[in-house]
Image: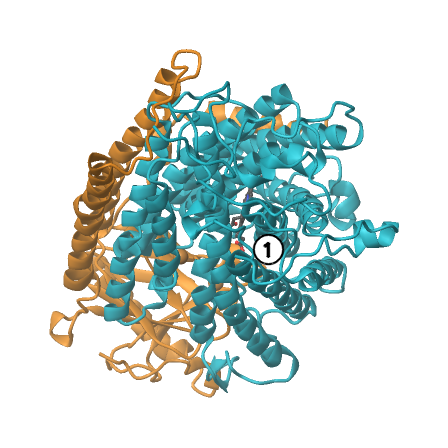
Amino acid sequence: MAFFEQHIHEEPKTFLSKYIFSYDHKVIGKQFLWYGIFFLGVGGIMALMIRWTLAFPGEAFPLIGGLLFPTTNGVIPPDTYAMLFTMHGTIMIFYAITPILIGAFGNYLIPLQIGARDMVFPLLNMLSFWIAFVSAAILFISLFIPLGAAAGGWTSYPTLSTLIGSPGAGQTLWALALFLLGISSTMGAVNYITTIIVLRAPGMGYFDMPLSVWGLGLTAILNAIFLPVLGAGLLLLIFDRVFGTTFFLAGAAATSGTGDPILFQHVFWIFGHPEVYILILPAWGIVSDLLSFFSRKPAFGAKATALSMTSITILSTLVYGHHMYTTQMSPLLTQTFMTLTMTISIPSAIFFTNWLGTLWKGSIKFPTPMVFSLGVVFVFGLGGLTGLYLATVTTDLYLHDTYFVVGHFHYTMAASVLLGGYAAIYFWMPKMFGKMLNETLGHIHFWLTFLGLNGVFMGMMIVGYGGMHRRIYNPFVYEFLEKLIPINTFVTWSAIVMGLAQIFFVYNFVYTIFFKKEKAEANPWGVGTLEWTIPSPAPVYNFKEIPVVKCGPHEFGNPALTGDRDFQYQTEEIPAT
Amino acid sequence: MGIFSPVLAATTAVNNSQMGLIEMMAPPEDISVHGNLIDWLFAYTTGMNILFFILVCIGLFGFSWVYRASKHPKAYYTYGNKKPHIMIATAVGLSVFIGVDMNITRIANNDYVNVFTKWPKAEDNPVRVEVLAQQWAWHFRYAGSDGVFNTEDDIVQLNDLRLPIDRKVILQVLSKDVIHSLYFPNARRKVDAIPGRLTRIWWEPTKAGNWDIACAEMCGTYHYRMKAHLTTYSQEDFGDWLAEASDKALQVNDIENPELFWGWQWQW
Ligand code: HEM
Ligand SMILES: [Cu+2]
Ligand SMILES: [Cu+2]
């Protein structure tokens, strides 16, 4: 498939060219992985601060509270609370989950799984990381300036996010940081798409690619199309803030202007709804592969799964209006968006059936990556089904902007994507770092995280149905919410459990990379995709010879196989029966 | 001790609450004629969801258990692309779509068209209220005795809405600064308050009492305190209050103050 010769990279010699300004997709992937894990920690601590405030209003945040909020004796003040949930949402979506799933695994897996020596545009790849780095630095700095960071929610609706609601520079820096990040991700996306099109190994058709690559590729397409839309919205917002334009200002009172604040919501959600699929598609792909790998059975209906993911990608561009029912769009638009949203359930149900079909009559093993994948099936089931209430306009009139929404979207993008990301880390660890993570710690990590997250997100949906609206510093100024104190406390304890569970992961990860001596085998899981045909960790040039692909990625348990392997490599012919 | 005191407070909170879990999870009391439509659809969707989620769990946990490698060492070699396989997947997809989604969509659509956007007309004689949201307060305006808005005899209330039961109320909503959302938990309804764009909401209270109104859309630091009080009266009590408030309005309204005239022509 390659249209040009892929040269063997020379091994970089200096520290700088090897670890910092590296062109190697594997190193860039690892850079994104560290970056994402770092921000996952930051965002996680912010989540705990938010939860602490909700369960124990007026109590000092333990341990670091006094240090961070000296003027209030460690109690989180209301303006800081707003910055915390804004930054938590922004960081988790754009600086933690996106870099881990797309930055790290997109970079690492695409060339290896399609049998290429690197991305098509290595320089673009390096720039993509370093622009993301600059973006993160800007966001980080904004936490420490006068008047503080952005505090209008991750959605940053005008006019709150214009000078009327947010006079500080924090909001401008927020928009600038996301604008830069959009550039970085668009660069990455262009690179991924081109690589998948031109660098597939000879013999590899699109349906011979692992479903992980399908997920990552579809994500890249959405990224390439819709991040520029966000960029446009942010640019106009920056104009309104810095140059005094009035794109999003309207009305006669405090907000005189000839623009329209709702315009921003349209632009934001045209991007925003695909964004949730941008996050979930790689996880779907990875889970579809892992379920097959550990059931030792071909992925059930793999082609249908790939096509379902494709149709969801297309549908995801047509449904964004379900975020805006309460702005009172025209009834016709409202009805159209409701109906279109509902159609997403067809492809979703098909690939759920395929996931379960993969397990059916398998020979299932349960190492850590598999339990995380099964966890994704469970939590995404809950997340997907609870979306129905929000797609339905009448129930949404009650549930919109309550904790029910918060619970729902955490099930889909926090829980599912997080578990999917962990599955990927545990699974590709040997290929990335040449060592295996500890299985016992991995299982403890899974079960505590799983229990904790269900407590958190189920609890959030319950208080949301109880009427508790979101982004509120102290719910208990409302009489009708007083009875929800115990559930809120329970949610917070679950969050603490979930937070503490991550210590098992961090310890396991750091210990394995820096201190563990035992090396992993080339193919510890017994899987036939191309990355497992080369040594662990993968050498700089990936493949000494560009492989020639002769079968699909999920060839397990073919009865005609001779020898003691129950799987075959993608470079092997399917034996004739 | 510092870090344990909240723990103790929490455990006592749980012990002291006499409520059962189910009661605690219930939404706020419904005091509207049509809130039950939303509650019913929520319950219906929940029923469907539980059914389908149980099916997912049977597959997930059941297959994981039955086909674990120690009991089932040899996997069945299939791509799942045989006719029956494809038919099952398609059947599941379509039954979810037609049986659940389209059903819910149809019901929601009926409620939406026949109730929630079926705006009361002048003939229905609804209570008309203009609402102006600002950081962080709600202003409510009644037309007063002349029945015309934005005149000297309007009754203007701060964070204090009073409504009669068994009569429709229609509220036109606007914001002065940022986007807010007028949220009546007890009526299961909300609508955004937007600068430069009128939105509206109507409902009909059924029960007299005292209730909370909240702002549901993030609107700045004190978003959580943007709370108003709703009093629902019997028709007679409402009449008494309105008469009294009209008299008072003529006395207290400072017509020199342009701020008073934030209202607008009522738009049917
Ligand atoms: C440790 C697990 C987590 C906990 C306990 C948690 C908790 C919370 C809480 C309490 C809020 C505030 C909701 C509100 O007031 O409206 C929130 C908001 C949010 N979270 Fe998380 N979260 C977690 C993980 C994640 C992850 C992994 C993501 C990544 C996708 C995420 C994305 C968001 C977003 C987008 C918001 C909305 C922010 C906003 O209102 O502007 N969360 N989370
Ligand atoms: Cu959406
Ligand atoms: Cu408000």
Quadrant assignment for the C terminus of chain A: top left
Horizontally, is A436 left or right of B193 in the view? right
State left or right for residue A480 relative to residue A527: left
Q: Is residue A410 visible?
A: no
- Image quadrant assignment for residue A442: top right
The image shows residue A248 at horizontal and vertical percentages of: 50, 78
- Residue A348 image point, x, y percent: 33, 46
Query: How is colour applied across the structure in the image?
Result: by chain
Query: What residue is shown at x 77% (from left), y 25% (from top)?
Result: A516
Side of A192 where A358 appears, left or right: left
Residue indicated by mark 1: A94
Q: Where is residue A58 drawn, in percent x and y?
A: 63, 42
- Residue at x 48%, y 67% (from the top left corner): A225
User: Any idea which chain is the cyan one in this picture?
Assistant: A
- Which colour is chain B painted? orange
As drawn, B33 above or below B253? above
Q: Tell me the chain of label 1.
A: A
| Residue positioned 59% across, 22% down in the render | A444
Q: Residue placed farthest to the right in the image?
A: A14
* Picture coordinates of residue A462, whole percent (x, y): 40, 38
Instruction: Give the vertical position of A227 relative to A49 (above or below).
Output: below
The residue carrying pointer 1 sits among few (fewer than 14), some (14 to 19) or many (20 or more) residues within 10 Å by Cα, namely: many
